[in-house]
Amino acid sequence: MMIESWLKSNTYHHSVFWDIMNIVREKERQNLKISLCIPTLNEESTIGKEIVLFKAELMHRYPLLDEIAVIDSGSSDATRDVADSFGADVYLSSEILPHLGTKRGKGENLWKAIYQLRGDIIVYVDADIKNIHPRFVYGLVAPLVYRSEVHYVKAFYDRPLAFAQNIRPSGGGRVTEILIRPLFSLFLPELTAIIQPLSGEYAVRRKVLETLPFPVGYGVETAHLVDVYQKHGLTAFAQTDLDQRVHHNQPTESLGRMAFGIMRTFFKRLENAGIVKELGSMNTIMRQFQTRDAIHEHLLTEIQEEERPPMLDIPEYRERWKH
Amino acid sequence: MSSRKKRESFTTLRRQLPRLRGKLEDIREMFLANLVMLSEIPAPTFEEEQRAHFLRQRFAEVGLVNTSFDDMNNVVGIHPGQGNEEERSNILIVAHLDTHFAPTLDHSVTLTPRHVVGPGVCDNGVGLAVLATLPTLLEQLEWPLQSNLLLLGATRSLGRGNLDGLRFFLKHNRLPCRAGLCIEGVQLGRLSIMSVGMLRGEIIVTVPEAYDWTSFEARGAVALVTDVVRRMMAIPLPRKPKSTIVLGSIEAGTSFNRMATHATLRFEVKSESCDIVRSAAADIEDICIELSSESHAEVELNVIARREPGGIAFSHPLVRRTRSIMKALDIPLTTSPSTSELSMFIESGIPAITLGMTVGEKLNSIREQADITLIPTGLAQLLGVLAAIDRGFCDDD
């Protein structure tokens, strides 16, 4: 078990990367391009701030980022207009590789970003972060720039804050602690070292991203961890403590649906790897209940967890990137 | 420079300003990023260190020299002028670092294409963002100044801070200042040139533990402090010189069904005449003594701050030039007296004004809102005034 040594060598606090100019110099020496992808769906209240901060600090002040792209799932609010007004490259997910159709879910945007964006490294940052700061990007990019053997850097958030108004800090979140960590402990114990496996902020090398299949829904982060681990081992990962992430808390019912999608993705991978056998076909219906006027209502939600193939399998991508 | 040449030169400067405003649109991201990051660092009065550290880091990043903290945790940096080192004058630009908001409050800021919203964005996130961004603006816009700019983020400005940060700086600063500019987030068009006389105080009503609640005249602290308010409102004040008593806040009691044992009233007396401030203060003191003896409760007056009235004349060249610059940018002028940083400059004999940078709403609330589309106009105004001071257009004739 290499968890202890990995934690020592591959876990960082963002403050060690305070010298952003040095990261930029190293990036330029290696002739790397870095793209930021912000997947959105109705994020008009937070998207403007994210773009302004990243553009001003990490494009103008320190030229770390080569592009900032918003990939939108079809927001019905002003997300795309706000993003555009602050100078981001804004794409509608359905307009990227349109002949492949559109699937619903954040993973779809992340996958299409691999085709659309130019970077050798792609950083994904969610759009709902209220306390956004440049560290959310440079803290994740720096281990990739400094260490060639690292391919995938995950964020974690380690310092509790007391916030009212339905906002809470992310420690290890509820789904992580009661689902993911027990599953990893059972089947892939080394992956328990990833402190926050579901965090939506990570930076990845293109050469790894293009080989990964992408669940379009809840399971995308878990699938990445399992797939990268099985191909490259724990040494391909690093993680960075970004202090705090303030965001709106999700109701338990939503987390239940998330857990359902993640389990489907996870067990499918265990079966493919031969870790579990003869699972058979798994149900796609998540069943929940709510009580209204003493009557128990049965709520059914279909969660397919469809997957996109590795981008390398898409001819247009191979053509674009001359593979 | 002859008067005629000065006039012509100033006219040329005025003509440049609308075009300058257009160029400022291009660097708004940098300003907004500074505004967001500064505003999101909590900085209640006496706890400004974290915000001051961030500002100092910004000063260092943009190449200011002598960036430092002083004993009051004020943060200062010098943007060196391009003039001959021995002949360079100094212009002091100050914005206060502290806010009214508790550190436990969610300080997240929201940005829309038109507004920035969050606690303290107007007072004084915008002012601090001006300090953090100004050196880059001067460089990118190629707006050279012969004078040194002393950029000061001042601590302990508000409430009980009583301007102690700026007071300390001005007392110990060894660089002579040609002029001072106080930067406030709002309101654009504000031109403060005078400080009014002011007394800031609080009246604390404390009902003793052994108070006889059964006696007929027994009243809790809420009723007593209300009586103080009623009597203060009856203090006669003249229309001229302009005078007022501002009743700022009352805190009292803990529940529905228990008489309050403590109450605090916070207020300010303001007047263009220091005699009236003194007279009103004496009246308030009498009210406290009188009520204390009538009720057997303790009614105590604490004076937190005093300011002497003063300022520069409406006809002072600094004021005339600033008005003219505002006109060139179509900024509607509002002159109003100040009791903030400006009064420290006045006490120190430094000609100074206070300028607002944009228009704000919902001030002093957690939804404080500043119009970001007007910030280029506010900045163009500031750059115009700086150039006018720097080129000698604002010196006494």
Image (cartoon, coloured by chain):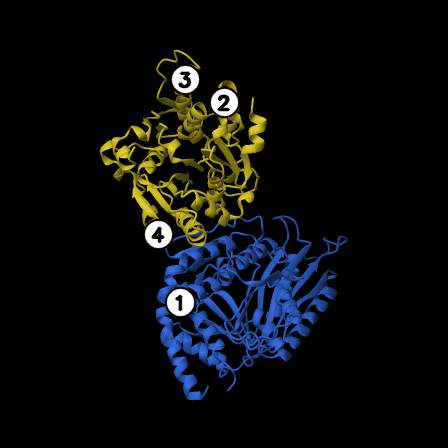
Residue B263 location in percent, x, y?
66, 57
Q: Nearer the viewer, residue A192 or A306?
A: A192
- Residue at screen point 63% across, 62% down: B161
| Residue named by callout 1 | B377
- Is label 1 in contact with label 3 (beta carbons under 8 Å)? no
Tell which residue pokes out farthest to the right in this image: B210
| Residue named by callout 2 | A184
Amino acid residing under circle 4: Gly
Amino acid residing under circle 1: Thr
Q: Could you give the CA–CA distance between mark 1 and mark 4, rounded to whole angstroms?
A: 21 Å
- Residue at screen point 68% across, 74% down: B282
Mark 1 element type: helix
Chain coloured blue in this rendering:
B
**Location of residue A94 (image quadrant):** top left
Q: Could you give the CA–CA distance between mark 2 and mark 1, rounded to whole angstroms?
A: 57 Å
Tell me the subunit letter for badge 3: A
